[in-house]
Image: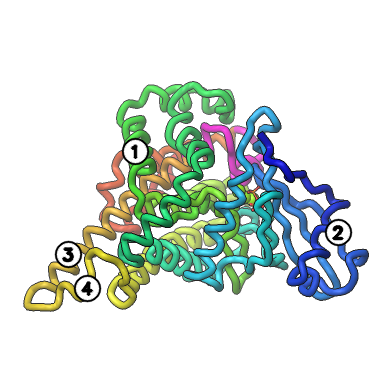
Amino acid sequence: DVPPGYRALKEADVAAYLAEIPAVATNLGGQPAEWKIREVGDGNLNFVFVIEGPRGGVVLKQALPYLRLVGESWPLPLRRSFFEYQALVVQAKAAPQHVPKLFHFDETLALTVMDYLNPHIILRKGLIRGTVYPKLADHMATFMAETLFATSDLGQPAAEKKKHMALFCDNIELCRITEDLVFTDPWRVADGNRWTSPQLDFTAAAVRTDGPWKRAAQELKLKFLSEAQALIHGDLHSGSIMVTESETYAIDPEFAFYGPMGFDVGALLGNLYLAYFSQSGHETMPGSRDSYRDWILKTIESIWTLFDERFRALWNNAHAGDVLAPALFLNNQEPLALKAAQDAYMRRLFVDALGFAGAKMTRRILGLAHVEDLESIVDPDLRARCEKRALKLARLLMVEGGGFTDIKAVNDAARATQREA
Ligand code: ADP
Ligand code: MG
Ligand code: MG
Ligand code: MG
């Protein structure tokens, strides 16, 4: 069921294809024969070519009719490229400084051409190396607040939101991947599940019979299925963020759809906690990553604090929706009532984010797709110790997330877990 006209581009086809797109040819400069082309896709899903010309560079990302990680046995629709393109357009409007500039979209070939981010690296790799990113919290809080607010019922009228939702409702297959891999498979015997064995065999079996944990996962899945709060990125882990010390970009929004905002916030926080618990596996000597561990927790705290602050500021100053308008609450005690509504809204979002963070952590340890933070720890005993700590916090976030008063309390729990044997 590959649509007519589709073909997977080979390295040798790329220059001729791009030469026909004036904006791209101009950006690259020189002649097509001078363009240097290489395939760099390290992701699970798609092919990514970097093209560098005398003037500038672009990235061409093309979807294949199957999942790259698994191969042709797992078909996946090409139209995910359409949703990625649509999401990039919306994100570029809300947070232009944090998404790569888009040059071209080709629906038939299921590809996008965007700015080559250079010398930016994938955040996950920086976190493994122990690199500090002073602007990361500020930038990601801004990206999430701006994109989530703008597409929520607070940021746009109901009619626009419904039309936009209809567009993204069709991203069924990619949502389905999340639904299965994040919320269900780690809690059952499923093809593709794997873990550090035999060290985690008992843990994995215990998770599959842990009623409260399983229930929490299913209730988060229900939120994911039914709460169309805003256009979410849908895959906002540290492998979808590219950084230098001064710049931060979110890439790869092919999982975008109208879903619960806490899923994006939780993806980011959960992957930072995975980075935190992985540090013991990357220390050259015991304690050498102590200050880096502290930086990760400080970054987590700042991300939530700044996100909360910016989201509320947008609510108070840029409300454009049909519900909970500040202008409706101007008399007497009414501003206090609005403040109470805002507190309740942000509190729900916080607890959702913690739950989603826990689900994302769990699936990276017991499910199909793992993370380099942990996989690169060669000693399986050491890796398993890191993974057990991460799973312990993950369960707490999912089952007892409502018990945390604030983000500092979550970090205290992470620290306590790290200190245990
Ligand atoms: P997938 O959907 O297959 O995960 P990604 O969009 O995450 O694909 O891209 C895969 C890899 O390609 C990224 O991890 C990154 O290394 C590189 N990449 C993607 N987009 C860019 C870009 N705009 N600039 C530089 N590198 C990029
Ligand atoms: Mg990716
Ligand atoms: Mg990637
Ligand atoms: Mg992707």
Cα separation between marks 4 and 2: 54 Å
Residue wearing tag 2: 16
Mark 1 touching mark 2, by CB under 8 A?
no
Q: Find disc 3 in the rendering and name its residue.
A: 340
Which tag, 4 or 1, sits closer to the chain's start? Answer: 1
Up-down relation of residue 312 to residue 64 (above or below) = below
Residue 374 in picture, x, y percent from top left: 59, 42
Identified at 64% across, 66% down, the residue is 102
- Mark yes or no: residue 276 visible: no
Q: Position of residue 420 (x, y in %)?
A: 42, 42
Identify the residue under disc 1: 222
Residue type indicated by callout 2: Ala
Q: Nearer the viewer, mark 1 or mark 2?
A: 2
* Mark closer to the observer (3, 4): 4
What element does badge 4 sit on?
A: helix
Please tell me how crowded label 2 is: few (under 14), some (14-19), or many (20+) other residues with Cα within 10 Å.
few
| Residue with the most extreme left position | 332
First-in-chain label (1 vs 3): 1
Mark-to-mark CA distance, 3 and 4: 12 Å
Expressed as whole percent of the image width and height from the top left, the position of residue 381 reads 59, 33
Q: Is mark 4 within 8 Å of ligand 4?
A: no
**What is the secondary structure assignment of the residue under circle 2?**
helix
Q: Do labels 4 and 2 touch, CB within 8 Å?
A: no
Numbered range of the magenta stretch: 362-380
Q: Inspect the image, locate mark 3, and give the three-letter code of the amino acid beneath it.
A: Ala
